[in-house]
Amino acid sequence: MAWSLFSVGQQYWRDPWERSILFLDALRQRGSKSANRGIDERELCFDRIWEQLIRTGATRHRSDLKRPNVLVLQMAKVASTSIRSALNKRRINVFQCHGLSAARQERDLNRLRRADVTAKLIKRRLRQHLRYVCLHMMVRWYQKYKSRNGRKLKVVTLTRDPVDRFASNFMQHRSTALPQIVSWQRARLGKDTAAPIDELQAVQDFVIELASIIGNGRPSAGAQACSACEALARERWPQHFIVEDEISEWLRPLTWFETEIEHVFGLDVLAAPELRERGWAEAHNDWVEMLVLRFENLAQLTPEIGRFVNVTELVLPRRNVTKGKYGASDIMSAIQAALSTPIGLACARELWKSRYARACGYPLPGRSPTIGTPSGTITPQASLSRSARQNVRGISSMLYGVASYSALIQLV
């Protein structure tokens, strides 16, 4: 009884505004329960999934509004943000993600467990993980019930040359990678933690080391060989996780379609000869329709996306363009200088031997033996310019300054 009286008193002394919110919430839940009695399990299940999609930021709409649901599922750095932006403007529910497989979810959860707890981790990585779990549930819903409002789930995915994609993907997370690469370079050269390091040279040497691991590991043989490359990275640099992490990112395209498409949807889109011949292909089963496009031909293939989702005159805006990022030119030059060395070129040939590259038609006909960049190709370079090194040194100093300021704020 004492506890009951205490609870009543605690409720009585709540702020009036808080009591109003609790009252309205109780009414909403009561009305929801009454409405749910008339909804079958199929609709109720979808509604519950949609509620969680809202909570995790996957959508802002209160319901799907009977619009088509399109999933842009891709390996990152293949213009997916542009596709999502264009389709959102055409009254289509668009969801974007990089992977829904059990392997992807386990990997993300494992990284969350090992990572340092920060506000950025919670805001981005944890929220993203929860959003991907919700999208996985939506995919399972379609697999069970086959269609929504008479439509199958539509999936758009893209390929990209595994050699070119690395530089673009690296630029996406360079702010966290650069300090770790500098630390790796100091360890490689046997210097103390206070020794000055040429950041651009460190990036070039780091990429050559990655290329050497890929050349020795022979990842073109398949998933086990890719895992062997990661194991070799751990063996060479057990104290520098950045090496294993970047090897994993570089090799992601080689196994991504098997893990994220074939295992999740039961479709082997790489088996379609049309993908290699014309740059796009379609596949479907009784609950999903899929369009796969080659990133390098996206400008010419935009009408195919419009046809697939039944919209006309689709225009893709420029979003998240690598060469538009601050400092991109110098860092990209450092990466390309590494890839233009004999070790880098041998790495490229190894990647192009993979089933993935051959199925997509990489390298594309007429490609130069040098490595492609967003603005064309470059010739092999023996060294980087002094001004380029100074620019990246400034970028790195700025990043260190931001990190120091963040640490100071946490201490305060």
Image (cartoon, helix red, strand yellow):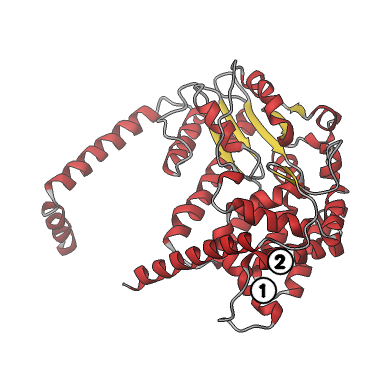
* Residue 140 position in % (x across, y down): 61, 37
Pick the front one: 197 or 364: 197
Is 403 on the left or on the right of 232, as rendered? Answer: left
Q: Classify 10 Å Cα crowding around label 1: few (below 14), some (14-19), many (20 and above).
A: many
Question: Dot 1: what SS?
Answer: helix
Residue extending farthest front: 386
Where is residue 346 drawn, in percent x and y? 87, 57
Q: Where 157 falls versus 190 (above or below)?
A: above
What is the x, y in percent for residue 284? Answer: 73, 27
Locate residue 293: give its quadrant. Answer: top right
Q: Which image quarter holds the N terminus?
A: bottom left
Residue type (three-letter) at the residue carrying disc 2:
Phe
| Residue wearing tag 1 | 185
> How far apart are labels 1 and 2 at the CA level?
8 Å
Marked residue nearer the N-terminal end (1 or 2): 1
x and y percentages locating residue 389 in the rendered image? 62, 63
Contact between marks 1 and 2 (CB within 8 A): the answer is yes
Query: Can you tell which mark lies on residue 206?
Result: 2
Judge by depth and name the residue closer to the eye, 67 or 293. Answer: 293
